[in-house]
Amino acid sequence: MDLTYRCNERCIHCYLDHEDHGEMNTQEIKRVLEQLAQTGTLFLTFSGGEIFLRSDLFELLEFARSLHFDISLKTNALLIDIERARKLRELSVRKIQISIYSAQPEVHDAITKVRGSLERTLAAIRFLQAEGLQVKIACPLMKRNLTAYRNVQALAAELGVPYVLDMTITPKMDGDMSLLQLRSSTSELLPILQDASLNPRACSPNSLEAETISTGSATSSGIESQAYDDIPCSAGHNSCYISPYGDVFPCVQMPVATGNLRKQTFQDIWFRSEEMNRVRAVRESQLPVCSKCSIRQYCERCPGLAQMEGGDLLGAYERACELAELNARIAGVANPVSAMHAERSNGKNSCSIPVPTATPEVRIGSN
Amino acid sequence: MSGEITRNPKLAWREVDGAMVIISPEDSQVHELNETASLFWKHAEGKTLDELVERIAAEYEVARETARADLEELLAALGEKQLMFVAPEAKG
């Protein structure tokens, strides 16, 4: 749940606009939390924007704890001091994820556009650690800080905290695609994907400390299940995203509006939204192109990005195909070609393979 | 052991399909209670062991000694994992 889109940093890759267009007030959020608890929600993440800009943050945390939620926070930590760290510990917040773009202040601060931000964030991490709270560093990687992962890795080791590298740079929520220029090309990512200290595919399973080192998306809950083999992702199944304005989406990266909590209850949306149920009905085996892909196992296709970047929740999209081919090559597959690229290539020579289309009965409407 | 039984207030928990799922914020350890322990979790809060023994003995028609032994065993298991404990009796 994003409590606000307002922020005290101006990160160059941020997909949000930072104006307040009418955030839910304290009572509205409390009502939503009650509905979430009644529906059986256990894991609750407060994110933003910068959550500490909400003057009612601790009141909301206290209320959430009274409903026995497991609470995680995502924050830039600029506003966390000793006293706030102590309060977070008293409220039994389980995990606090904090973005760090580099261990070099000039690189980190250039991305956040706040001078001194790295120093303040690191000070806050130490306050939180002193209280015994679990901190995790998230490092979104883009052109501007591509080589920083090594110093972030070293910083995390020095602090004794886990970290996650996130290579996902998404379009803005309003559909503006200009942010994609910031992300590294797949060839630029090659050395990272080949780095045995980071990439699960490049090292033996036993050498990877899954709890302390991981690559992937920072949107992951961190508690994954193997029970979803034929489901594209957890969105709409065991997780969803709520905006500061009460809009409910299957995921923060999936622009499929399913309802608004100012007009409907969470139960109404979760159980009865047509859009939510359509998202739930999607199965990997039904994906028109990707289900036929020979290098599917190397792909980290995101349905939301398929919608945002490719225009089709069920479709393939360029970035995922490129990364899958790169990962397959690293794993030793000779001349890996994704199904989408194969179809495109074949299509140039003949019309024997139809242009991929979504199966009508499970097609997800555009936003 | 006549103090009130209480849940560890730091824990996050929710009933999922009749079973209690509990998470410890300090180590992210997930505990899933069986049916009996889940019932105990739901109904023991704020009661003393003596009260629970009386209730179990009456409802399930078992000897008090048997009910007490079972409940003590369950409470010890939950206490070992720091999920529930018996609060010290208030003085005065």
Image (cartoon, helix red, strand yellow):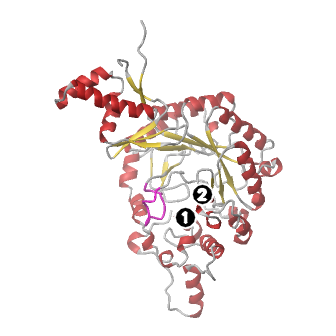
Disc 1 residue type (three-letter): Cys
Q: Which residue is mark 1?
A: A302
Residue A235 shown in magenta = yes
Q: Is residue B83 left or right of residue B50?
A: right
Is there CB contact under 8 Å for labels 1 and 2? yes
Identify the residue at the far right of this view: A106
Given residues A138 and A182, the one toward you in this image is A138
Q: Which mark is residue A217?
A: 2
Query: Main SS type for the magenta part?
Result: loop
Disc 2 residue type (three-letter): Ser
Q: Is residue A47 left or right of residue A159?
A: left
Instruction: Name the element at disc 2.
Output: loop
Percent x, y of residue A218: 60, 54
Given residues A48 and A133, the one toward you in this image is A133
Q: Residues within 10 Å of mark 1 (few under 14, many from 20)?
A: many
Do callouts 1 and 2 point to residues on the same chain? yes
